[in-house]
Structure formats: structure tokens, C-alpha cells
Image: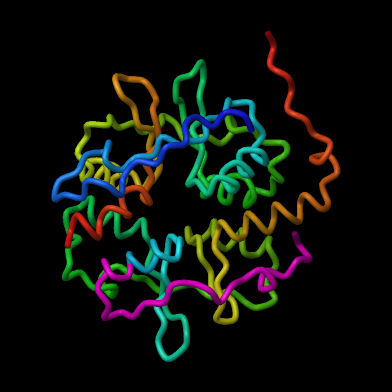
Amino acid sequence: MTDTAGSTEKGRARPRREAVVGDAYSEAFLAVPRRRRIVEVAKGIMDEGLAGAIVTEAGRPVGVVTRETVVKDVLAKGYTGMEVTAGDVLRAPILTVDVDTDLQEAARLMTRTRIRYLAVTREEKLVGSLSDYHIARLLPDLLK
Amino acid sequence: MKGIRAVDFTTAEYPRVGYDEAALAALSKMLGEERDYAMVVEQGDIVGVLERKELVFLYGRGELDGSTLVSRVARDLPWIDSDATFDDVVRFMAEHDVFQVCIDNRVLDDLMLLRAIWSERLAVAREFREYEEPKEKA
């Protein structure tokens, strides 16, 4: 697994009543090419304790594979993960938010789509990921 | 995975909350114990589950605040027979769209399931042990 980009965790700081994605997202994310076998993608997700992996093509995010994808679309269908690639099961198009997007707006996007793993961009360049965990860890301070 | 009992990979270590507890306090417990859910426990028995994602969805709808109770968001937790195999649990999760199941008052979640399957698969999948990622073309 060689495609993990970045490692700096954002968030925890600057608790305030209104927050933006830039306050919460993680610069750590797992980016994998379409051809990567799911068994490897799953191992990367588990090793890093992530909600999912971002599937990229020529450096651009094109879809997402989550733990739920692995359970529902791979194992439950009788595959072992060896014969299925990220490109076979990715959810596309990937949902993207900018670092300056209001955090509640990002949560609203997750609510509407029931997808809890978003790509984060700055000036259209992929810079990180935003999961329900990243939002949740700010909520006790934001809402108290 | 057909012959592997899922109950052997469950845990009794999970955040415990009550229906009358504040949802934000329950969320703090989840975050503290690094879980994406908490079990609703009454008289020692698991009766429901509160998922972190549902709290975030509620926040997205603008309906989460300090007065929100666990009972507003929690749902019944599906039980599965104690002799269930990994295959049974995988099918159950996919069919019911749940990612935590209760077996003998213990819990198996999707991350634990994948980790268990992974280790088992590593033990049996010779082809994977010998698998190497193709080298990138220059």
C-alpha cells in the first residue's frame, strides 16, 4: 500500500459555533488506483482505521470504497476480495467539498446521500478526506 | 468462513448508554472509546444501538442539540444466533444494512468482522501471501 497521502490531523482546535470543513478534515487519506485489489484496499482501510479509500485516476478522485462497500458489495456477494478491484465496486461520482464549505453543509450532504466519506479539495486539488468521525469529534464543543 | 463461529470474535467492550442520556454525552463516550457506535443497555442487556453517523446526519438536518436524547436517534439492535458463522453475519449486515450485530449480548461490528476475516484469510490464502503488487511502469 503506497498511496497514502499526508498524515496531519486537522480539527480538535478552534472550537466555535460555526465551523468549516477546513476545521475538521484530515489530510490523511488512502488513495488507491482502480486496479487495486479489494483485499488490499480493505487491509489499508483497516490498518489506518479509516472509513474508506478514495479511488483516483491520474491523480483525480473518481470514486470511493468504504468498509460498507467491502461488506455489502464484495463479501456478501460471495467474493473473497482477491478477484475484485477498487474499480469494480467504487461508488461514483465521488462527493467533494471544499475546505471553506460550512461544516453543517457538509453534514447535510452526508445526510442527503447517506454517504459519510467525502473528498476534500482546495482550489480543486485533493487535499484530504472528511468522514462522519471528523465532524462528530467537533460536535460536543460546537453544540454545547 | 462458513465454519468459523462469529461469536468467538465478538467483544463485551463497547460504550454503554441509556435511552434517557443526552446524545452529545453519548457521542463523547463513543469518541473516548474510539467506536463509531454505542450500545443502549437496559438491565444488563443490549437493547439498541446509537450510531455516530446518525448523530452527524441529525446535525446535518439541524436537529441535534444539547437536549437531544439517545432515544431520539437509537434504534433496535438486530440479534443473530450464537452459532452464526461469518458468512451468516456478512449476509445479515448486507440484508439489514446494519454494521453492528449482537450475539449472546456481545457485539461484532464491521471493522472487527473485516479484521477477523482478514486474519483468517491471511492464514488460509496462500495466493495472497504470495501476491505482490505489480511494479509501476516507468
| In-front residue for pair B88/B51 | B51
User: Residue extending furthest top?
Assistant: B138
Left or right: B104 in relation to A125? right
Q: Quadrant of residue A103?
A: top left
Q: Residue at x 84, y 36 (%)?
A: B130
Estimate the x, y position of residue B51 in percent, counting from the top left.
39, 63
Q: Is residue B12 magenta?
A: yes
Measuring 47% from the left and 31% from the top, which residue is drawn there? Answer: A6
Image position, residue A60 (x, y; %): 45, 20
Percent x, y for residue B86? 68, 63
Magenta-drawn stretch, dominant element (helix, strand or loop): loop
Q: Quadrant of the N terminus of chain B?
A: bottom right
Q: Which residue is drawn at 41% across and 29% down?
A: A93
Nearest the camera: A88 or A40?
A40
Would you place residue A97 above or below residue B137 in this image?
A: below
Task: Report whether A111 appears left or right of B16.
Answer: left
- Please check the rendered image and state whether residue A126 is part of the magenta-colored stretch, yes or no: no
Count every numbered label the image shows and give the total: 0
Quadrant in which the C terminus of chain B appears: top right
Magenta-highlighted residues: B1-26
